[in-house]
Amino acid sequence: KNEVEQSPQNLTAQEGEFITINCSYSVGISALHWLQQHPGGGIVSLFMLSSGKKKHGRLIATINIQEKHSSLHITASHPRDSAVYICAVRVRSGGGADGLTFGKGTHLIIQP
Amino acid sequence: DSGVTQTPKHLITATGQRVTLRCSPRSGDLSVYWYQQSLDQGLQFLIQYYNGEERAKGNILERFSAQQFPDLHSELNLSSLELGDSALYFCASSTGQGIYEQYFGPGTRLTVT
């Protein structure tokens, strides 16, 4: 079983819909990242969370540390939001190791 | 633009060869991370350096090695290349150790033929 599980794997929606992508993890973490990867391949960091909720524009990310679960929401979705969204965790460890462990990603397509 | 640069963008080479990928972190960032993204394995952490010293190893093969130089740029060396090493290799940087944002470079696409 992967340490980081995302759902759904694929999601197709109509422009304007509210989108939710879920991430569950099975290890103790010190932070969780949501990343966006467009077809060209570049990776952009959207959020880094260690508790609570963050909002940036139409994107909202929440995390529940007790339940080991995070969600990424997109409000008023737009075709330009089409991308792969990746959940990644920084596993809690001593010694300052910060390498991320990744989910397999959610491939989102927003149709006009 | 994240401020992290990687060269080259694309690299095509033959099995058994050796290549070097280069990464320059954002100005002032002390930590550098290398990640591999392949179709079958997804994104995997390879290795982390902090201020010139190796900090953590992930799923890095023995045929691969890395270093971080005094000017903080880093190089990832891949040797005895196999077809399965074909992947996107990303470098990321962060300010320091701990809970810091990681900024990803544009990646180097390696094709082994």
Image (cartoon, grey):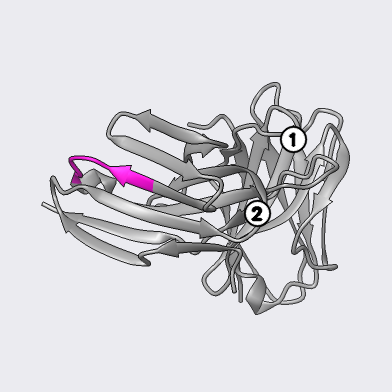
Q: What residue type is labelled 1?
A: Ser
- In the image as oriented, which residue stretches furthest toward the left? A112
Q: Where is residue A82 in the image (x, y as percent from the top left)?
A: 28, 52
Answer left or right for A19 relative to A36.
left
- In the rendering, which numbered label is found on residue B76? none
Chain assignment, label 1 = B
Q: Name the residue under label 2.
A: B35
Q: What element carries label 2?
A: strand
Can residue A3 be seen here? The reply is yes
Task: From the top left corner, tell me how far across and down residue B53 is, in percent.
Answer: 89, 39
Q: Residues within 10 Å of mark 1 (few under 14, many from 20)?
A: many
Q: Residue at x 13, y 49 (%)?
A: A15
Q: How crowded is mark 2: few (under 14 residues within 10 Å), some or many (20 or more)?
A: many
Q: Is residue A75 left or right of residue A46?
A: left
Instruction: Classify B62 as above or below B104.
Output: below
Front-lying residue, B53 or B1: B53
The amino acid marked with disc number 2 is Tyr
Q: Residue at x 74, y 35 (%)?
A: B31
- Relative to residue B50, is residue B77 depicted above or below? below
- Measure the alpha-carbon separation of dots 1 and 2: 13 Å
Per the image, the residue denoted by label 1 is: B31
Report the residue at 80% width, 66% height from top.
B79
Q: Compared to B11, does B94 lie above or below?
A: above
Q: Can residue A39 be seen in this view?
A: no
> Contact (CB < 8 A) between labels 1 and 2?
no
Q: Give the range drawn in magenta.
A: A72-78
Estimate the x, y position of residue B58 in percent, counting from the top left: 76, 59
| Chain letter of the residue carrying label 2 | B
Along the viewing direction, whichever of B12 and B84 lies nearer the viewer: B84
